[in-house]
Image: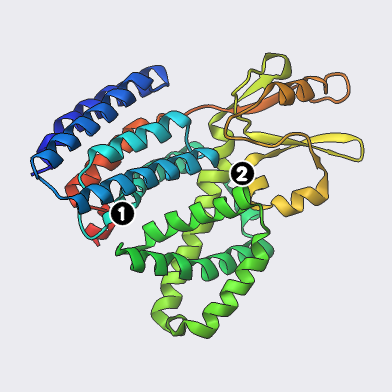
């Protein structure tokens, strides 16, 4: 079996990189290079010995390239570091592809990594935040306009997501769908920078016309659960979580590469801050409130942004900025790899 060629190196690679990520907060490139070198060498040998054919090799190469692109996209969305993206790619090249996922096997691996960390983070935020803070973000999230926008988005785009899953042979479930909805939401707002409301409205109208499955009690129940989970996760993971994994840094001590956990706006001659999480959800509204001083980038602060922030000293009462502190993601990527191997795909789909 192919897995016996790769399981020992997966375990060794995962244990070493997880230890270094937790202990030192970084993933050294040499481990990534060694993993990729082993993958290339092993696949050359396996192909030469006819363990698999050219069709499998093609699927393996395309799957690997797609995982690299997905890792880069998620890094660009500030959902993990560049090191995590490279680690995800390296793990993907070490895992045999199980049918029926073929070219898109990496999606199962990706969800198997993100779902456990989301659950852990949710429980952590549930017990580590005060009742007052929970109530504040609950009120801020559960308002009529926000609920309407999110329900419209999920209703319209979930149709596309489920259709794509069916097309590539990926069994859908509520957690996998939720994960895909979040990624699509981030992609449209951060990368395409399009106002979601208009697209959501169009997609929802088309779905009402062409998708008869929406006129059933089963769909209404599943859709209501998905929308509720989306709102709850937005509160605990993105809103409250944005300030929990952050530290205050004075403008004079800012360094290149630091990733802001908040943004600064100028309105009517005054400067004020806003958490990054809310600027993602309400980007269009923020533009009407004031001028954004700097754009949040996956690369973090550059020299130009630091100069702009330091120039505020003396002009405003602001003298510091919250920057993100990293959370070890490597152990969850490693766990995702093990779950993918054990369940031959998405573990939630195998359990339900």
Residue 317 showing in the rendered view:
yes
Q: Tell which circle, 1 or 2, labels the residue nearer the N-terminal end.
A: 1
Pointer 2 residue: 277
Residue 290, position as x, y percentages in the image: 83, 44
Relative depth, front residue between 134 and 198: 198
Tell me the tag on residue 103: 1
Residue 122 showing in the rendered view:
no
Residue 248, position as x, y percentages in the image: 64, 23
Check contact, mark 1 vs mark 2: CB within 8 A. no
Q: Which residue is the extreme one toward the right? A: 268
Dot 1: element: helix
Relative depth, front residue between 140 and 307: 307
Q: What residue is rendered at 12% in x and 42% in y?
A: 2
Does residue 183 lie above or below 16 as drawn?
A: below
Quarter of the image where the N terminus is located: top left
Residue 338, position as x, y percentages in the image: 22, 41
Relative depth, front residue between 127 and 148: 148
Q: What residue is rendered at 41% in x and 21% in y?
A: 26
């Amino acid at each position: 079996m192919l897995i016996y060629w790769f399981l020992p190196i997966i375990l060794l690679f995962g244990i070493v990189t997880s230890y270094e990520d937790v202990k030192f907060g970084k993933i050294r490139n040499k481990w990534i290079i060694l993993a990729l070198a082993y993958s290339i060498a092993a696949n050359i040998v396996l192909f030469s010995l006819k363990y698999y054919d050219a069709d499998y090799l093609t699927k393996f190469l395309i799957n690997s390239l797609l995982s690299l692109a997905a890792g880069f996209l998620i890094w660009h969305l500030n959902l993990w570091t560049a090191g995590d993206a490279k680690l995800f790619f390296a793990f993907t090249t070490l895992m045999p592809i199980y049918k029926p996922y073929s070219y898109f096997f990496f999606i199962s691996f990706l969800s198997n990594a993100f779902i456990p960390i989301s659950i852990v983070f949710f429980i952590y935020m549930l017990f580590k935040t005060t009742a007052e803070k929970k109530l504040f973000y609950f009120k801020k999230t559960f308002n009529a306009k926000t609920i309407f926008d999110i329900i419209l988005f999920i209703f319209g785009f979930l149709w596309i997501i489920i259709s794509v899953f069916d097309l590539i042979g990926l069994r859908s479930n509520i957690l996998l769908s939720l994960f895909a909805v979040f990624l699509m939401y981030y992609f449209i707002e951060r990368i395409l920078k399009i106002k979601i409301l208009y697209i959501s409205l169009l997609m929802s109208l088309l779905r009402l016309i062409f998708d008869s499955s929406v006129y059933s009690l089963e769909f209404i129940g599943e859709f209501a659960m998905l929308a509720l989970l989306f709102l709850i996760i937005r509160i605990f993971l993105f809103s409250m979580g944005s300030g929990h994994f952050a530290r205050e840094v004075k403008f004079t001590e800012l360094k290149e590469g630091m990733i802001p956990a908040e943004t600064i706006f100028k309105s009517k001659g005054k400067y004020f801050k806003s958490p990054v999480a809310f600027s993602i959800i309400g980007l269009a509204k923020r533009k009407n409130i004031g001028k954004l001083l700097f754009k949040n980038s996956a690369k973090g602060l550059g020299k130009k942004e630091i100069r702009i922030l330091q120039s505020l000293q003396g002009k405003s009462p602001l003298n510091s900025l919250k920057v993100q502190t990293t959370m070890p993601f490597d152990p969850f990527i490693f766990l995702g790899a093990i779950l993918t191997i054990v369940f031959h795909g998405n573990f939630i789909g195998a359990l339900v």
